Image: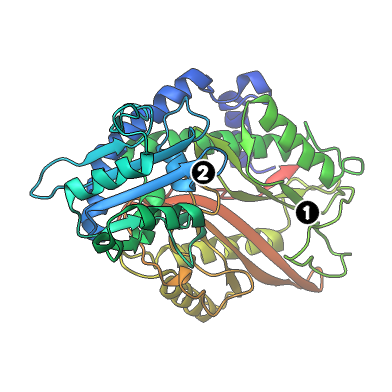
Amino acid sequence: MRKHHLIYLLLLCLVFPLSAQDYPAMLSLERQTELHDAWLTERAQTVLPMLMKRAEVDMWLLISREYNEDPVLNTMLPGKWMGARRTTMLLIYDPGNGQPLETLACARYAVGDVFKKAWDPEAQPDQWAALSQLITDRNPKKIAVNRSPDFGLADGISSYHYDKLRESMPTSYRDRIVNGDKLAIGWLETRTPSEMTVYRQVMAVAHAIIAEAFSNKVITPGVTTTDEVVWFMRERSNKLGLGVWFHPTVDVQRKEQDELYAFSGRPGSVVIQPGDLLHCDFGITYCGLNTDTQHNAYVLKPGEDEAPAFLVDAFRQGMETMDVLTAEYKNGRTGNELLAAALAKGKAKGLRPTIYTHPIGYHGHGAGPTVGLWDQQGGVPVRGDYPLHPNTAYSIELNTKVYLDAWGKDIRMMMEEDGYWDGKTFRYIDGRQTELYLIR
């Protein structure tokens, strides 16, 4: 075993001892709730004014019923609310001239500390009439609602609520309603400095679970199956009080394998053997933030102390593809422009990349520019045409095909790591895997 890899494992055991109680310190639910509310207050004061100005909209309405919540409205509810109450209406208004935004709740209750109660049911029993009055009193030029043909996360208003809104307001105001795509996506994709400080801890927990899963504590070659490793990840997450936003994957590539598994289906469960190249896809939800990570490991054969040079080189090529993509990040570039540039430059370097990178944050497949799909390497209509903005996070997800003479076949070096674009530089939130995990 290489000396520096041994040092890494020793440090890993010191920082992340491999037992549930010794993982990076986990916040209590109460503390997470306090953090959520502090972030919401901060975002209302900093992110919202910027977005209203950037979208050139002076009023934004979010309307939801209990159990049918708009995904954007869900992120604006206080931490102690599990969802909307009855019909919850949030109104955000920019009066202009440098004045602070109004953030109002046309509801029976104030919605946390941010959205002040602005409806008295005793004075006006009709909630929709009350909302109409709030709108006409402010006389906005544009009224944005979360309605979109292309972005699911920006399409949160129900058909009934959209029709009811138009019916309840004066006829002269109906033509002022516009789709709020830019506001919805901007709100969901923008990360604050406070969130990014915690995001590093969230990623550290995800990395620690993978490090434990890809170790001899979990894997006994010749005995342990890939599905057992998958369920270990699920169980470990559950014991730590974490959510997972998709069922993990653990798969193998080996010399004797007939072909690569298709992305359209899950790989079958197999017994892990010496000489296998292992790969996982794993994501947790913690503090309202999501991770999405694909790491790789090698199972040492008897007498081996390190991975074969041809696999080390394949791993290097995968990292090089990641570097080619992140070097193309630039404000205003669309996802399709990033994809085309990275593919061209990667191929010019002799690489064989497939890129399917996506935003991440409040949602695993988050709001923002789509940078390729595994089956759409020529670009993604509309969602790939959305531009890159500062203070946004991404899962750098891709694979690089590499032909191995020793195996007489192609493998896919599949990688994924979460990173942050601050408007000038790209960095990985908690670093990235720089060499294969080794399993004895």
Give the residue at mark 1.
251
**Which quadrant: the N terminus?**
top right
Residue type at numbered disc 2: Glu
Note whether residue 327 is visible.
yes
Mark 1 vs mark 2: in front: 2
Q: Nearer the viewer, residue 150 or 377?
A: 150
Q: Where residue 410 sits in the image (x, y, percent)? A: 75, 72
Q: Is 348 rendered above or below residue 96? A: below
Q: Are marks 1 and 2 in contact (CB under 8 Å)?
A: no
Going 26% across and 38% down the picture, which residue do you hit? 103
Going 45% across and 28% down the picture, which residue do you hit? 79
Note whether residue 114 is visible.
no
In the displayed structure, does residue 184 sit left or right of residue 434? left
Q: Earlier in the sequence, mark 1 or mark 2?
A: 2
Q: Which mark is residue 207?
A: none
Give the residue at mark 2.
69
Q: Outermost residue, right direction?
A: 223
Q: Outermost residue, left direction?
A: 97
Q: Secondary structure at mark 2?
A: loop
Q: Secondary structure at mark 1?
A: strand
Q: Nearer the viewer, residue 332 or 139?
A: 139
Q: Nearer the viewer, residue 227 or 118?
A: 118
Residue 354 falls in image quadrant: bottom right
Q: Where residue 305 sits in the image (x, y, percent)? A: 75, 45
Q: Where residue 132 sits in the image (x, y, percent)? A: 29, 47
Residue type at numbered disc 1: Asp
- State the separation of the CA atoms marked 1 and 2: 36 Å
